[in-house]
Image (cartoon, coloured by chain):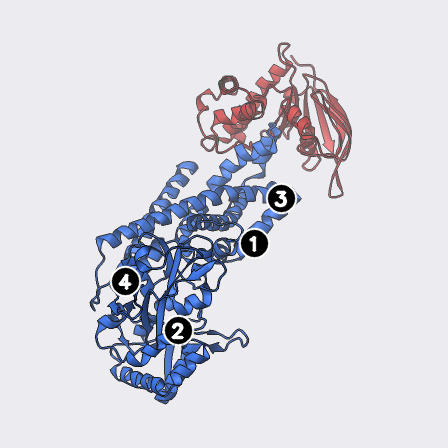
Amino acid sequence: MIRITRLRKAFAGHSVLAGIDATVEEGKIVALLGASGSGKSTLLRCLNGLETFDAGALEVAGFALQPGAHDPRTLHALRAKVGMVFQEFHLFSHLSVLDNVTLAPRVARGTARARAEAHARELLAEVGLSERANAMPRQLSGGQKQRVAIARALAQGVNVLLLDEPTSALDPELREEVREVLRRVARGAHSTSGAGLTILLVTHEHALAHELADEIWTLSAGKIEGVLRPGARP
Amino acid sequence: MRASGELGWGADLQGGEPYVYESPTQPGVIIGFEVDIADALARELGVRAKFHQNDWSNLVPSLERGDFDVALNGLEDTPARRARLRLSRPYFVYGETLAVRAGSPLHALAQLRGRRIGTLNQTVAQDLLQAQHAEVVLYEGQQEPYMDLAHGRVEGVLLDHVIADRYGCAQPGLQCVKQDLARGTYVIGMRPADVDLATRVDAALSRLIENGELRRILEHWRLWDARQEELGARAPVAAPSASATVVPSTAASANTSVSSTEPAAASARSLSAAQLWLFVQGALITILISVCAFGLALPLGVLLAVARSHGGRVSRALATAYVELFRGTPVLLQLYVLYYGLSSVVRFGPLQAAVLGLGLNYAAYEAEVHRGALAALPRGQAEAASSLGLSRFQVLRHVLLPQSLRIALPALTNDFVALLKDSSLVSVITVVELTKRMTIVAVELRDWVVPGLLCASMYFAMSFPLSRLSLWLERRYQGA
């Protein structure tokens, strides 16, 4: 679960997050809508410590974050539970698809290679890329890259998944394959057997937000302007 | 002699005291006993003496090219020179003086077989030592061999008494063998075609000897001694064999001809198999030094680059200072400081100092290459890695450096090839690598073309495969 309390953040005197209060319950999916510069991405980046914040408090996957610099050990532990997917994928270009997915479990968590690879292959199967495990990132399409990035973010068994405009960098015809993967991940989050995955999705795609989210927050000028609850899911 | 009324004479100022050097009290004024001799000579000839600065080891080629009229700079009378040049009658008699550490049993030429003995390149002393099969260590300057003797890097130094008296014998811990190991003369070198000039120079020198002017000059420089009494007797030498004499340790007066290793043939000689093998050895030394130095420069450079781009304030400042210091001063200077300057504190062998000097210097350049390569990586790579929970070190080790090394690869190859060639600088600290070997052979053969081309082709044979390898690696990493 994610609890955001009076969160404030300014860049060079310019307020980006102007006091945000919100909670995402465990196993829920929240979509963040808003114009460019409304603070969506900054909010997301505060949640896994890529950005520090000036005031307020955060609680993410059981970890409390305070204003100012974060303790590296806290971040290390938090990031085992909070995965992030970037707009521009950021796959490690010198590593194969399989190594991209296993790098963090092996290096940051000390998982044995065989175990990490077995788990990575399961995840790659889920995102439909079993065949491309040994490919290099440069050999993949944009949609395939983003699917690998999603598998990579999930590889540590995270409780919280942060998605920063996962379809925005893609050509329209490639977006559907990523949406399909997101639907599957969302179903996992909503299933009773699921590990209670909490998802925060920054997007410009209203249709996708309405389809997947339990709640839609609209951000404007660093504040949550409105909260919408799409109808009960079938 | 030029129609301008000048006698152009070539000599080397560097380390030239008391021969030819810049006055320490009047900068720009050139003094020395050879300056006085050149002036006296010019007066006798009715012209003005004009000094031409020329690297000592290239005096003869420059004379042949016509850069000046005469070479007047401690040029020893040897059969080889006599075969190549027109030489005047002697103006100075020198004794080959052996300097050793106090208490050393070495005192005669015959004892020097297999010993590590220092001297200057292209000297009679070098020939004498090679004839005795001593392990000859060649220096460029006159002070350095005695420093190395004091520090135990060589067992003795054999040089003219003018140099030994001035730079070696008085040093604490050193002593000079009283008797000359050999005796020879300094003469003035002229082009073989300048017959008329040679006759006039000889006549002028004779007058200077007879009227006591030469003696007056040498006395002024405190160089007049019993040896110089021979000057009058040593009239213009007709036979090439009487050029230098070995003085047996028992009788200083016996005249035994120097058994120079070179025959006095006038024609250019060709490269022997033994010399070719020496070239290969020189190339191996070049490779050894370059590989070891780069093996040091690469990791140190990466470390410095990481310190500069990811370090704290202190490590950033230290790394920047290192780069600026080593990049902003000549590598030649660094080699001198490392080998001679620090020798009272740490005593490196020539190879160690060469590897260390080049390695430390190139690390500064590699640091900048890697810093640039790290900066060229998209910021998202580091963010994605840290968002996965990798520590800062793990991000560098597993994500940033593997990628930046690939970016840096062409520049690294470039630097390694540059290092391969810069390694020739280490000859100043007595390492005989490929280029030094080439200059030695070229002087012996009196031919710069064949040794030069051979040397160039060896460098090319070393660097070309490297650039191919680099291209292949680049393609492999970047994919088709």
- Whether residues under marks 2 and 4 lie with C-beta atoms below 8 angstroms apart, the answer is no
Query: Which is nearer the N-term, disc 1 or disc 2?
Result: 2
Residue named by callout 2: B11
User: Residue B325 — which label?
Assistant: 1
What whole-number distance in Å separates the C-alpha atoms at marks 4 and 1? 39 Å
Relative to B352, say whether B204 is above or below: below
Q: Chain of mark 4?
A: B
Dot 4 and dot 1 within a common chain: yes
Q: Three-letter amino acid code at disc 3? A: Ser
Q: Three-letter amino acid code at disc 2? A: Ala
Query: Which is nearer the N-term, disc 1 or disc 3?
Result: 3
What whole-number distance in Å separates the C-alpha atoms at marks 2 and 3? 49 Å
Query: Which is nearer the N-term, disc 4 or disc 3?
Result: 3
Query: Which is nearer the N-term, disc 4 or disc 1?
Result: 1
- Whether residues under marks 1 and 3 lie with C-beta atoms below 8 angstroms apart, the answer is no
Dot 1 and dot 2 within a common chain: yes
Q: Chain of mark 3?
A: B
- Whether residues under marks 1 and 2 lie with C-beta atoms below 8 angstroms apart, the answer is no
Residue named by callout 4: B444
- Whether residues under marks 4 and 3 lie with C-beta atoms below 8 angstroms apart, the answer is no
